[in-house]
Image (spheres, grey):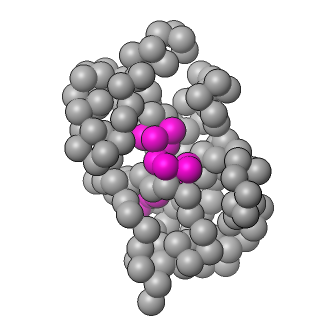
């Protein structure tokens, strides 16, 4: 069985990861992951697994697959709302991913702010996983 990619548990049933390849998706499927949310735009890096190919592979393994591509510059309220809607309805466990896990964690934190969570607590929690979302308040202000 392929080994799992590094995962940062954001909440029960929800983890963030960096870029996922074919072996990572197969390992996640074998571990029981039921949903993958890809926050990477296609073509972000040379050799990156295209979202359409990742979707086919995930669905072949019975994993629900969602593609909500964002960059720091393009992140919008609609992206946060779409991400929140997926998290509310997605079968767990869920793995969200981007190049490093930072954008996916930032999206999750923005959904938690909408639920009244404390920004400093979210920033500290992400930092414990080596993920820097110190810009969370600035993103929240931009999207308000």
Indicate whether 138 appears above or below 23: above
Is residue 44 positioned above or below 4 on the image?
above
Quadrant of res 56: bottom right
Residue displayed at 51% across by 38% down = 103
Compared to residue 43, the image places residue 5 above or below, namely below
Q: Which residues are magenta?
A: 93-105
Q: Quadrant of the N terminus?
A: bottom left
How far from the left and from the top, in percent, is residue 134?
36, 25
Percent coordinates x, y for residue 102 in the rendering: 46, 41
In the image, residue 58 lies at what x, y percent?
63, 70
Q: Nearer the viewer, residue 85 or 7?
A: 7
Q: Is residue 58 visible?
A: yes
Q: Is residue 107 left or right of residue 116?
A: right
Q: Nearer the viewer, residue 57 or 127?
A: 127
Which residue lies most toward the bottom here? 1
Q: Is residue 91 left or right of residue 109?
A: right
What residue appears at the point 64 percent right and 24 percent down from the top-left corner? 73
Report if residue 97 lies within the magenta region. yes
Work out whether residue 61 or residue 18 is closer to the camera in this orientation and state it: 18
Q: How many marks?
A: 0
Image quadrant in which you'd find residue 41: top right
Q: Position of residue 27 (x, y in %)?
A: 48, 78
In this rendering, is residue 36 above or below 121? below
Residue under the point 73% across and 57% down: 46
Q: Report the side of 134 relative to 22 (left or right).
A: left
The stretch drawn in magenta includes residue 59: no
Whether residue 51 appears in this view of the structure is: no
Which residue is more in the foreground, 14 or 22?
A: 22
């Amino acid at each position: 069985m392929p080994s799992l990619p590094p995962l940062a548990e954001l909440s029960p049933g929800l983890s963030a990861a960096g870029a996922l390849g074919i072996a990572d998706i197969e390992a996640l499927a074998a571990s029981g992951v039921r949903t993958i949310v890809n926050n990477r735009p296609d073509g972000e890096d040379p050799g990156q697994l295209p979202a359409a190919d990742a979707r086919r592979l995930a669905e072949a393994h019975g994993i629900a697959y969602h593609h909500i591509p964002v960059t720091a510059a393009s992140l919008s309220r609609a992206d946060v709302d779409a991400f929140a809607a997926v998290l509310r309805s997605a079968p767990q466990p869920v793995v969200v991913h981007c190049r490093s896990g930072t954008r996916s964690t930032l999206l999750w934190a923005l959904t938690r702010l909408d639920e009244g969570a404390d920004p400093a607590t979210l920033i500290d929690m992400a930092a414990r996983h080596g993920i820097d979302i110190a810009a969370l308040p600035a993103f929240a202000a931009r999207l308000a």
